[in-house]
Every structure is written in structure tokens, then in C-alpha cells.
Image (spheres, rainbow, N blue to C red):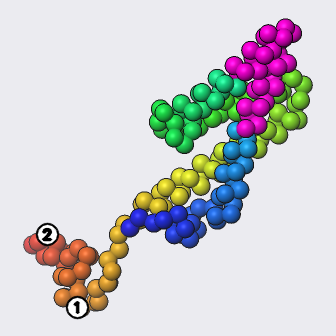
Amino acid sequence: MALNDDQARATGLTLPQPLHLANEGLAFLLELVMVASLAWWGSQAVSGIAGRIALAILTPAAAVIIWALLAAPRARIQLPLPGVLAVKAVVFAGAAVAVYSMGHHALAIGFAVVTAVNTAVATVDRQALMTTRAGLPDAPEELPQVGDERGLMGSAWPNWHRWHDILTP
């Protein structure tokens, strides 16, 4: 039986809805910070104004394109989960290294830690939600009663007693 999100969350295997929404919101905020960090780095990386403008535009644009193609929920190229996580790690690490290289060490380390924790929690929550939502077998509407031959025969439960009779000499 396929479950909706609320039913899947009721199993206790996923984050409660308010925490899920907060974590997803934080993920989006971190993506925006990543883009801004790369633009900031680009504007500081070289001395000429033309180079600064070019890097401030092209560096975050490259990250956004890579993200849209490979890591976004509706990515054009669907990678398996380890591939998506690798792309996210490279892009987020690039932003953290960029900020670190500008001398803002604590900011870069804090960003990297928050990003890693958020990505781990989001990945576990999303996987549990997908597994729970789609992975529960259909249950029969009425359970057979012990000793009720008619209940066993007319239900969705397999007739295990018949297989036993066939397989045993």
C-alpha cells in the first residue's frame, strides 16, 4: 500500500513535518549562500575590474549550471544517490574553500560543517520517506481467523497450507 507523506511520517522513520520543512528550508538557504560565496570570491580573486566582474558572474553561474544538471531534485541528468552527493560535496566544498582562501576561516569551516550535517540529515530523511512511502506491501482488508478455512481461502493471504500439502510427501 502506497502511503502519502503524512502517513509515511507517522511511521516514525522520517523527520516530523516541521523539522523536515526547516531542514529543507536550510538546504535552500545554504545553496543561496554557496552561490553568494562564489560570487564574493570571484569579486576578490583578481586585481583587474574586468576579471573581478567575470569571475563574480562566471564562477557562481558554473556552480548553478552544474547543480541544475546533476544535483537538483529535477536535475536534467539523473545520477544515482552517491553521484548526487559527490556533486553536492564538490560544489559546497568549492564555496567553503573560496571563503577560506579569502581569510574567513571560521566562516568557511562553519559553512562546511552546517552544510555537511544538513545534507546528511536531508539525505537520510528523503530516503526514509521514499522507502516508507512506496515500500509497504498491501495488507489484506480482513485477516483470516485460525481454523476458518473459508477465511483462508477467500482472503488475500496465500494458502500456505496448500503449498505444505503439495511439497510434503
Left or right side of 87 for 100: right
Pick the front one: 130 or 124: 130
> Mark on residue 58?
none
| Residue interval drawn in magenta | 32-59
| Relative height, residue 39 to residue 82 (above, below) | above
Return the x and y of residue 23 as percentages of the image width and height: 69, 53
| Relative height, residue 85 to residue 153 (above, below) | above
Q: In percent of the image, x 82 and y 40: which residue is there?
A: 110
Q: How many marks?
A: 2
Q: Which residue is mark 2?
A: 167
Residue 42 colored in magenta in the image: yes
| Relative height, residue 77 to residue 123 (above, below) | above
Q: Is residue 117 visible?
A: no
Return the x and y of residue 1 as percentages of the image width and height: 38, 67
Determine the secondary structure under disc 1.
loop
Q: Are marks 2 and 1 in contact (CB under 8 Å)?
A: no
